[in-house]
Amino acid sequence: GFAGSPLVVGGKLIVEAAHTIAYDLASGEIGWKSERFTPAYASPVPFTFGGRNLLVTLKTEGLVVLDTATGETVAKKDWKTRFSTNATTPIVSGDKIFISTGYKRGCALFQFDGTGMDEVYASRAMSNHMANCVLLDGHLYGVTGNTHGAEKKELVCMDFSTGEVKWTQGGFGCGTVAAAAGRLIVLSERGELAVAEAAPDGYKELARAQVTSGRCWTVPVLANGTIFTRNAAGRMVAIGVGGGAARKR
C-alpha cells in the first residue's frame, strides 16, 4: 500500500502512487506520469529553483526531484531503510532538502544545484518514525526513535544547517509535533499534550495535560483556538486554548 496527501499546484492535482501522477484539476485527465518507483508514504512538496517549478518526494528508493510541468526526473538520491519504509515528507528551505526516517536510518540534509543533490550532513540523531519534524527559525524539532525496540525515543532540537543537536527531552514515546506562534505542540504516544517554547537553548515547557488515551501517532492540529487530537482507535478530542484556561470538548 501507500499513503500520502494529494497536492494542488499550478492547475494540477499531484498524487503519489507507484508513479507520481499529475491530473488536470478541472477535467481529471492525466497530464503526466513520472517514471515508476516503489510506492512510499511521503507527500510531494513544491518548490522553485532558478525560476523552475519543481516537486520533491521521498520514494522507497530515495529522494526524487521532478519537473512540475512534465514529470521529468531532475535528480535522484538513494535513501533506503531496513524495512523499505520511508514514511516522512521532505522539508525544503531554499536550496536545502531535509529528510529523516525511522528504523535507525536517521536524517540527512542535501543541497540541490538544479541537476543533482550533494549531501551536507547525515546523522542518526533525528530518526523520525511516525511524523515529520517542524522547522522554525533555523532549527528542527522532532521526535526520534522507532515504536519498537530499545532505541531511545526523545524530542530533539537540531540545527537545520549543521545537524548539531541543541537539546533532547524524553517522556513522549513515539509522539508527534506541530508548531504555532513560536511554540511547540507535542502529543505523546500515550495521549499527553504539552506546549513548550520553540527555543534552541533548552526545553521550556509551558503546559501539559493528559487529554486522551490509547496509542497516539497522529499530529495534533491547531485551528481557531482549538487543538484537535486523535488516537489510533479514531477517538477525537478537541482542547480549547483560546481566551483563558484550556478546556476539553
Image (cartoon, rainbow, N blue to C red):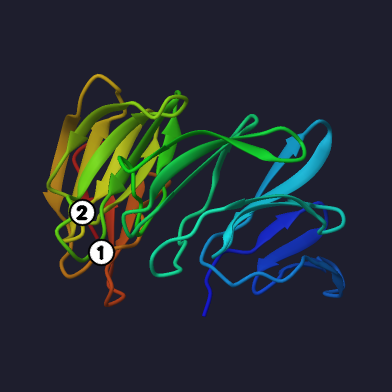
Q: Secondary structure at mark 1?
A: loop
Verify CB contact (< 8 Å) between mark 1 and mark 2: yes
Q: Secondary structure at mark 2?
A: loop
The quarter of the image holding the C terminus is: bottom left
Between marks 1 and 2, how big is the CA–CA gap? 7 Å
Q: Position of residue 171 (x, y in %)?
A: 12, 47
User: For mark 1, what is the residue?
Assistant: 216
Crowdedness of circle 1 by 10 Å Cα count: few (<14), some, many (20+)? Answer: many
Q: Position of residue 124 (x, y in %)?
A: 33, 43
Left or right: where does residue 3 sit relative to residue 15? left
Q: Residue at x 86, y 53 (%)?
A: 69
Instruction: Tell me which amino acid carries mark 2.
Output: Ser
- Is 41 drawn above or below residue 111 in the view shown? below
Crowdedness of circle 2 by 10 Å Cα count: few (<14), some, many (20+)? Answer: many
Left or right: where does residue 117 sit relative to residue 114? left
Foreground residue among 169 and 213: 169
Q: Residue at x 58, y 72 (%)?
A: 39
Q: Residue at x 19, y 54 (%)?
A: 151
Res 214 seen here: yes
Res 241 seen here: no
- Is 154 drawn above or below residue 60 in the view shown? above
Instruction: Tell me which amino acid carries mark 1.
Output: Cys
Residue lying farthest top? 201
Q: Earlier in the sequence, mark 1 or mark 2?
A: 2
Q: Position of residue 81 (x, y in %)?
A: 42, 61
Q: Position of residue 127 (x, y in %)?
A: 34, 49
Q: Residue at x 30, y 40 (%)?
A: 125
Residue 188, label in figure: 2
Left or right: where does residue 50 sit relative to residue 179? right
Kindly indicate the quadrant of the structure image that contains residue 115.
top right
